[in-house]
Image (cartoon, grey):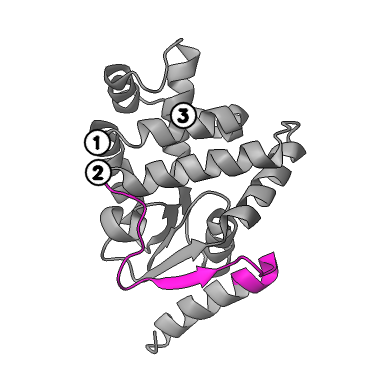
């Protein structure tokens, strides 16, 4: 069973995806870590994420160990990841790794922004997780604060709006909800409620009613 979880930053998709992977005994991949790792590789070699040729080279020669580096969770690397993710050749370089992970025996859970539309259009279950931008800004603020990175609410809100526009407006594999995806708006939901709703969607599909 392949479960595709898509949505914007701080919508709750990662938390939901990890919970579903644990519940159904499936391996999990946060595909965003691949793009963050490319951005980190660029930063470590003194290059800006806008340097297209360097970004393509970094993606093609990516050290997967960078996906475990805690620095990929900073706001700066997240913003850089959004930039390199808009480069078609970078996406192509990382596409095969994502497909290989998804197609392993037994299936997998993947979260990102184009899993249900591009990476795994044949996924058994597709869920598009969203929340209003103000709620997401507060969540992202809290997440960064927990790691010691303080960003004001207005600045965080502006960062998210810029990133949403870039992710949704890029020509190659934009952030979009698949036609056959289930919409899950977590704006007013607790973590437990959101996970339970997602679990119910998967169980309904398994039972043949979804």
Q: Is residue 57 left or right of residue 187?
A: left
Which numbered tag is attached to residue 71? none
Q: Which numbered disc flags the more N-terminal residue, 3 or 1?
A: 3
Residue picked out by circle 1: 88
Give x and y (percent) for residue 54: 32, 17
Quarter of the figure with the C terminus: bottom left
Q: Are marks 3 and 1 in contact (CB under 8 Å)?
A: no
Label 2 vs 1, first from the N-terminus:
1
Closer to the observer: label 2 or label 1? 2
Membership of 1 in magenta stretch: no
Tell me the residue that label 2 is attached to: 171
Residue for point 58% across, 51% down: 10
Q: Quadrant of residue 62?
A: top left
Category of crowding for the residue at label 2, using alpha-carbon neighbours closer than 10 angstroms: few (below 14), some (14–19), many (at least 20): few
Does 193 lie within the magenta span? yes
Q: Judging from the image, what secondary structure is the residue with disc 1 in? A: helix
- Which region is colored magenta? 173-195
Q: Is residue 170 left or right of residue 72?
A: left
Upstream in sequence: badge 3 or badge 2:
3
Q: Which residue is mark 3?
A: 80
């Amino acid at each position: 069973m392949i479960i595709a979880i898509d949505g914007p930053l701080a919508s709750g998709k990662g938390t939901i995806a990890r919970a579903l992977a644990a519940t159904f005994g499936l391996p999990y991949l946060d595909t965003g870590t691949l793009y963050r790792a490319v951005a980190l590789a660029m930063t470590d070699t003194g290059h800006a994420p806008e340097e297209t040729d360097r970004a393509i080279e970094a993606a093609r020669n990516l050290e997967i160990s960078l996906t475990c580096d805690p620095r990929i969770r900073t706001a700066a690397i997240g913003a850089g990841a959004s930039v390199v993710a808009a480069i078609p050749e970078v996406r192509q370089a990382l596409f095969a790794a994502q497909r290989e992970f998804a197609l392993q025996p037994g299936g997998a859970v993947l979260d990102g922004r184009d899993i249900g539309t591009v990476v795994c259009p044949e996924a058994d279950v597709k869920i598009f997780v969203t929340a209003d931008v103000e709620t997401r800004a507060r969540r992202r603020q809290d997440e960064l604060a927990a790691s010691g990175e303080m960003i004001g609410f207005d600045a965080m809100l502006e960062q998210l709006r810029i990133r949403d526009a870039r992710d949704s407006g890029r020509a190659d594999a934009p952030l979009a909800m698949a036609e056959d995806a289930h919409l899950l708006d977590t704006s007013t939901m607790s973590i437990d409620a959101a996970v339970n709703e997602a679990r119910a969607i998967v169980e309904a599909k398994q039972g043949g009613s979804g």
